[in-house]
Amino acid sequence: MKPLSSATHPLKLGYIFGTKHYPSTSYMYFFLLENLLKTIEFSRLRKQYKSPNISRSAATLLRKHMDNLVRGPARATKAPPTVICYICGRQFGSRSIEIHIPQCLKKWELENERLPKSRRRPPPPRPDCFTEQGTILGTVDKYAVNEAAWTASQAALVACEHCGRTF
């Protein structure tokens, strides 16, 4: 067994943990006891994980977990169905379109009022599948609703007098 050096000798540790660095020597005893317990716990855990029973049970758990996983290539998730706003042409969820349409109409009216009278236009026509509150009537085919909203938003665009591009 290798002899302890003077710096790590237990009697010298009392000086390190004396009143110079710590208020009392009780910290020294706490420190030594804590390190001793950590060493004992580490050696106990190391022996426990080296045993073949633990590794077999860990392998069994891992195998059961792997069986629950879906094998094969990763699949893309299906996007939630969206509805196109007939005013701005943006896509929204089926619930949020009901909130968006009244706000979008107010915003459109405010922007239209700021324009000079010569450039003002009437609000975009509401498709038949939408109520005045912006809700979708009944259980209508979402593709038909989106097609009607898209054509309504495109019809509301104004063509440039120079190039003919719609805005």
Image: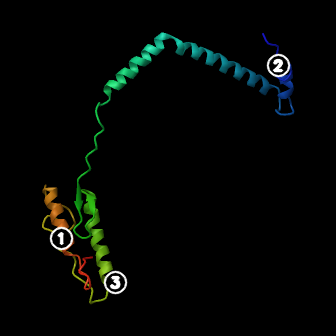
- Which one is in front, 52 or 17? 52
Q: Nearer the viewer, residue 60 or 16?
A: 60
Quadrant that contains the N terminus: top right
Residue 73 lies, in percent from the top left, at 29, 36
Mark 2–mark 1 Cα distance, whole angstroms, equals 88 Å
**Which of labels 3 and 1 is toward the front?**
1
The residue that disc 1 covers is: 152
Which label belongs to residue 131? Answer: none
> In which quadrant of the rendered view does residue 165 lie?
bottom left
In screen coordinates, is 105 left or right of 21?
A: left
The residue type indicated by label 1 comes to Ala
Which comes before the other along the chain, label 2 or label 1? 2
Residue 58 locus on image (x, y percent): 44, 18
Residue 142 seen in this snapshot: yes
Could you give the CA–CA distance between mark 3 and mark 2, rounded to whole angstroms?
86 Å
Q: CA distance from mark 3 to mark 1?
A: 23 Å
Q: Residues within 10 Å of mark 3 (few under 14, many from 20)?
A: few
- Residue 6, given in percent of the width and then of the height, sits at 86, 21
Residue 114: image tag: 3
Residue 112 to residue 79: above or below:
below
Give SS at disc 1: helix
At mark 2, the secondary structure is helix
